[in-house]
Image (cartoon, rainbow, N blue to C red):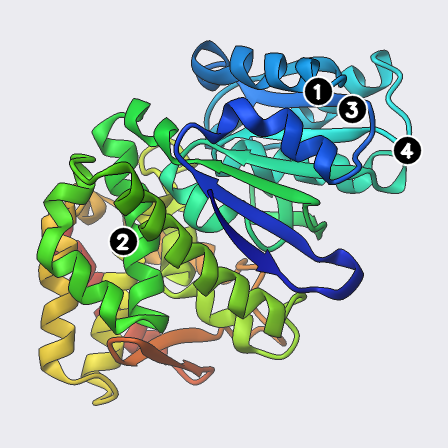
Amino acid sequence: MRTVQVDLGNASYPIHVGHGLLKDLGALYRGRDLGRRAAVVTDSVVAGHHLRTAVESLNAAGVDVCEVIIPSGEAHKTLDTVKGIYDALVEARLDRGSAVVALGGGVVGDMAGFAAATFLRGIDFVQAPTTVVSQVDASVGGKTGVDHPGGKNLIGAFHQPRLVCVDTSLLRTLPEREVRAGLAEVVKHAVIRDEVMFALLEACLEDVVDMRLAPDEIDALIERNCRIKAGVVQADPFERAGLRAILNYGHTVGHAVEAATDYGVYLHGEAVLLGMAAAGRIARDRGLWPGEDFGRQERVLRRLGVPPGLGRIPTEKILERMRSDKKARDGVLTFVLPTRIGDVTLSRDVTREEVVGGIDYAKGLSGM
């Protein structure tokens, strides 16, 4: 088992990474002195694969569990679904000594975390992520929330987990599309923070996609991403100093693409991939990013698999959704633009014409 410590003073917590770790969830939970009553929140897809393992592990550690199964998919990331979670917590009579365990991908983690942040004004929260995107990114950092018709994650709160339990063996149960989409966040981390990891992806991307790596190699890759995310979160836990904004590389356009398609066409990572393509083109056209590095990103994105169909979405519709982005300040969006593989800068003066150029380039990669 590998452990990454997120150092946030009284809100510090460990991220445990290991193959087959879900069966040890109960022991890890009790090791954090968490309450003896918990709600395990999962979705209808994950429940059939992993819920029993998680519940049996918690029960064996003396934890009384309430199971809460919610619909699967970003389209259900709403306040209505969170209300259903609240209803289950009330019915189970959970109190301030209880905890919520999120078992699932980023959607489950965001909603379960938001429910934990607001139920009884805040109870303990544990992340047990089951997808690539949640293991390398969404489960770390304490961002929780739900979508709104006006935009993605417009309603939410910061609520750090007490524990993150990452079982990398669960990734082998994912459809290939889910793996590829999740790896977009790995590419993001490499572009913003880790040139060595980017070179690793260039060398063996197909082996990562097909999960042909040995368990320890998968663990090492996930741990490396968790360390990147933890380092940024520690320096800027509430996204106030500006550093944490670099984690939004590809997300400004990506979130708008998700919202413009009513969260029903692209997986989150697929939309981020398109957003990285657009942001990378803006950076190259500005002369910020050398053409060689721009080309390296394009080749990796193509190998990862550019999702089709962006060309069918009106550019104006994407731009309209960008105007509702929660990251806007004083009506101005901050773009994360790469300057080299492993480093980025923040820009608040990207013009409409530049954004259109970036979207057009992403459309060219995606096609109809």
Cβ atoms under marks 3 and 1 closer than 8 Å: no
**What's the amino acid at mark 1?**
Ala
**Which label sits in the foreground, 3 or 1?**
1
First in sequence, mark 3 or 4: give its number. 3
CA separation in Å, label 3 and label 1: 25 Å
In the picture as drawn, the residue positioned furthest to the bottom comes out as 287
**Above/below status of 138 relative to 57:** below
Label 2 Cα crowd, 10 Å radius (few <14 / some 14-19 / many 20+): many
CA separation in Å, label 3 and label 4: 14 Å
Which label sits on residue 96?
Answer: 4
CA separation in Å, label 2 and label 4: 40 Å
Quick one: quadrant of the C terminus?
top left
x and y percent of residue 321 in the render?
46, 54
Viewer-closest of 192 and 196: 196
**What's the amino acid at mark 4?**
Arg
Which label sits on residue 48?
Answer: none
x and y percent of residue 213 in the render?
19, 40
CA separation in Å, label 1 and label 4: 20 Å
Q: Residue 30's quadrant in the figure?
A: top right
* Residue that badge 1 annotates: 61
Give the side of residue 33 with respect to residue 165, left or right: right
* Residue that badge 3 annotates: 86
Viewer-closest of 294 and 224: 224
Give the side of residue 301 with respect to residue 96, left or right: left
Number of marks present in the image shown: 4
